[in-house]
Image (tube, helix red, strand yellow):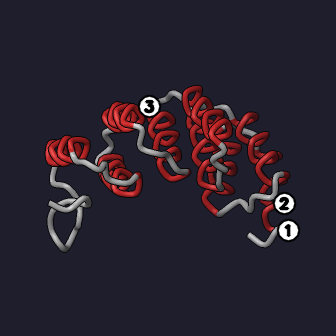
Amino acid sequence: MSVRGKGEKDDRFDNVNDALILFNKMIDKYPKPSIVEFNKLLGAIVRMKHYAIVVSMYRRIDLLGVSRDVYSLNILINCFCQLGRIDFGFSVLGKMLKLGVEPDVVTFSTLINGLCNQSKIFEAVSMFDEMTERGYQPNLFVCSTILKGLCKSDNTDRSVRFLRLMEGRGF
């Protein structure tokens, strides 16, 4: 079984049990697979929307001493955000900084999306501002997430201003 799962067409797991079987085989291997291989597996499980399982698996990977990268930490942040635990997502961001792993636009986008999903629009806009001040170029997903959040919170004046700002930046 490949890390990505079964089948050439879809290249994904049929169910989470297949992924867990492969995970158990991976953690028993010596030497341990790289974080890239674990990331592929974790990403497949995220696509199945089993976020709590991914968090549990990540903890086991961490205990094995497998080095982390920005991609694996972004997966973990996404899972916490999907589980409604944006506070843990921010803890992972702190861990990233402590480990010297540079957050990327995906890190900030994921946190902004998590904040918007919890109706914390002011915090999401503040994070967006901080992201752009640090030189990160926001992508269309981040901009549309902020815009959607502003509209949902009945901040129509602010959403129009934000839209004009994004138009001025070429979006």
Instruction: Classify the position of the N terminus by image quarter.
Output: bottom left
Which residue is at a point 78% across and 72% down the rendered structure image?
170
Which residue is at a point 51% across and 36% down the rendered structure image?
81
| Horizontal side of residue 132 vs 89, given as left or right | right
Instruction: Classify the position of the C terminus by image quarter.
Output: bottom right
Q: Nearer the viewer, residue 81 or 160?
A: 81
Q: State the CA–CA distance, disc 2 to disc 1.
A: 5 Å
Identify whether 85 is placed above or below 81. above
| Secondary structure of the residue carrying numbered label 1 | helix
Is mark 2 in CB contact (under 8 Å) with mark 1? yes
Asked if one can make out residue 17 in the rendered structure from this viewpoint, the answer is yes
Read off the residue under disc 1.
168
Q: Which amino acid does label 2 sit on?
A: Leu
Q: Which amino acid does label 1 sit on?
A: Gly
Which residue is at a point 79% across and 62% down the rendered structure image?
166
| Secondary structure of the residue carrying numbered label 2 | helix
Read off the residue under disc 2.
165
Q: State the CA–CA distance, disc 3 to disc 1.
A: 35 Å
Read off the residue under disc 3.
83
